[in-house]
Amino acid sequence: MTNVVGYGRVSTGNQKTEGTIDVQRHEVHAYCAEHELHLLKFFGDEGVSGGLEDRAGLSQLFEFLEDVSGIKAVVIYKLDRIARDLLIQEHLLKKLSLLGVEIVSIKEPDLAGDEPVRKFTRQIMGGVAELEKAYITMRLTDGRKNKARKGGYAGGGVPFGYMTTQDGDLAVHPERAEVVRLIFKLRRRRVPMSYNAIADYLNENLIPTAQAARWYARTVKNVCENAIYRGKLTYGGNISLRPDLALTGSRQRTAL
């Protein structure tokens, strides 16, 4: 039997249109069984854009192909699972070709190779996938800007002291918010504590960061300089006042 490997990818928030990794894995297994292909391993990337070449699963795939000889093809569900950027798509297919490996798309047969018509068809499909990605990005950006204009949370990393609600907004995290209030209280003492001193204080009292790691001066500095703790949300030039998110407390200097 011909030795092959499989690859799948889904991007963040698009599982409704792309399916889950498990769906793609099932389709690849079924295709290999039907066509008497020996599937050695399946690699996948979840929550990763097709416009990026630096992906953990993709890197593992190429490392496997370089280490294991005799693999003839990479089986994918659709071409846009490999990439949603035409240049990245063709670069990856070129790298596979240099390894003596072809790409096999379940939904788009006979796309591999450098024959003019096949290559032209493949590049047209890659260009369409790139255009679709651009439209998706544009809609997401417009949606986030509109949400920001209305005072909502437009996305991004959740700052320490907050959590996301079911509808995607920000809310105060009860326990971590107390740590943030403590940091601002220490900075507002009659003799303010330095960022280093505050970090040492938190570590000595076994108060962890969101990732259960140590505090550092720069971490404390980032908290003190982030406008969100004063109830200001910013996105794309929009500034919204959210008193319900303010964690700085009174501006009056207090001693511990």
Image (cartoon, rainbow, N blue to C red):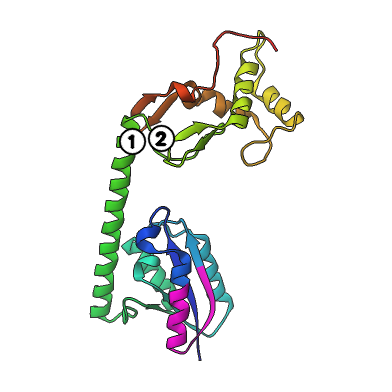
- Taking the spot 49% from the left edge, 22% from the top edge, the residue there is 246
Alpha-carbon distance for marks 1 and 2? 7 Å
Residue 131 in the figure: left or right of residue 58: left
Q: Earlier in the sequence, mark 1 or mark 2?
A: 1
- Quadrant for residue 69, please give it: bottom right
Type of amino acid under label 2: Tyr
Type of amino acid under label 1: Lys
- Taking the spot 45% from the left edge, 77% from the top edge, the residue there is 28
Viewer-proximal residue among 118 and 36: 36
- Taking the spot 52% from the left edge, 69% from the top edge, the residue there is 43
The C terminus appears in which quarter of the rendering? top right
* Whether label 1 touches label 2, CB < 8 Å: yes
Does 97 appear above or below 209? below
Q: Is residue 218 visible?
A: no
Total numbered labels: 2
Residue 2 placement (x, y as % from top left)? 49, 89
Range of magenta residues: 26-43
Residue 143 placement (x, y as % from top left)? 30, 41
Is residue 34 highlighted in magenta?
yes
Q: Which residue is mark 2?
A: 153
Viewer-proximal residue among 204 and 181: 181
Residue 166 in the figure: left or right of residue 40: left
Q: Is residue 146 visible?
A: yes
Label 2: which secondary element: loop
Residue at the farthest bottom position: 1
Residue 99 placement (x, y as % from top left)? 47, 78
Label 1: which secondary element: helix
Does 81 appear above or below 206? below
Q: Which residue is mark 1?
A: 147
Residue 200 placement (x, y as % from top left)? 72, 27
Is residue 159 highlighted in magenta?
no
Find residue 177 and name its label: none
